[in-house]
C-alpha cells in the first residue's frame, strides 16, 4: 500500500462550489482528506490549490472526477508517496 498526497492546480467555474469539489474528491476510493484553497478568483472562474491525501490514490480517477465537475487539472505541483506496512495501515 502507498500513502499518497497530491498538490494540484485546478481551474473551475464558479459552480460547483469549492465545498462540492472537496466532497466529490473525498468520495474517491482511498481518499482520506481533501483541502481546497482558492488562489485567484475572476468573473467566471476560480483557480484552486487542492491537496488530496489517501491510500493507493489513482490520479486518473481524480482527473476524471474533476472533469465531471467541469474543472480542469492544470498541473500536478507535488506528489508525496510513502510505503505503508500492514502494521502502519492498522493505525490509519
Image (cartoon, grey):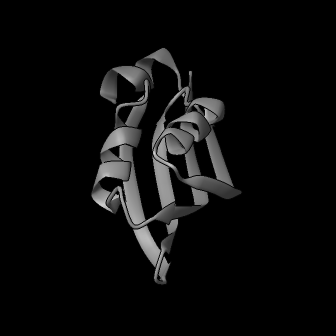
Which residue is more in the foreground, 28 or 80? 28
Task: Check the image and report above or below for 22 versus 47.
Answer: above
Q: Position of residue 63 (x, y in %)?
A: 60, 40
Residue 5 x %, y %: 55, 47
Q: Is residue 10 left or right of residue 43?
A: right
Q: Is residue 36 above or below residue 61?
A: below
Q: Is residue 14 above or below residue 42?
A: above
Please identify the residue farthest to the front as the structure is shown. 44
Residue 66 visible here: yes
Name the residue located 50 percent from the left edge and 62 percent from the top edge.
12
Q: Is residue 62 left or right of residue 77?
A: left
Task: Name which residue lies at 38% across and 50% down.
Answer: 21
What residue occupies the far top of the structure in this picture?
A: 86
Residue 90 x %, y %:
34, 20
Q: Quadrant of the C terminus?
A: top left
In the figure, residue 67 lies in which quadrant? top right
Q: Is residue 77 visible?
A: no
**Quadrant (top left/top right/bottom left/bottom right) for the N terminus:** top right
Q: Residue at x 52, y 44 (%)?
A: 66
Q: What percent of the width, then of the height, locates residue 35?
A: 38, 58
Q: Please tell me which residue is depicted at 66% across the width and 50% down the height of the picture.
A: 79
Residue 11 is drawn in which quadrant?
bottom right
Is 82 situated above or below 6?
above
Amino acid at each position: 500500500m502507498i500513502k499518497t498526497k497530491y498538490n494540484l492546480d485546478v481551474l473551475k467555474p464558479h459552480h460547483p462550489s469549492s465545498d462540492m469539489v472537496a466532497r466529490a474528491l473525498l468520495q474517491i476510493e482511498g481518499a482520506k482528506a481533501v483541502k481546497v484553497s482558492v488562489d485567484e478568483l475572476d468573473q467566471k472562474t476560480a483557480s484552486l490549490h487542492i491537496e488530496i491525501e489517501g491510500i493507493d490514490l489513482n490520479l486518473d480517477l481524480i482527473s476524471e472526477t474533476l472533469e465531471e465537475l467541469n474543472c480542469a487539472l492544470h498541473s500536478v505541483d507535488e506528489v508525496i508517496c510513502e510505503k505503508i506496512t500492514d502494521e502502519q495501515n492498522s493505525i490509519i
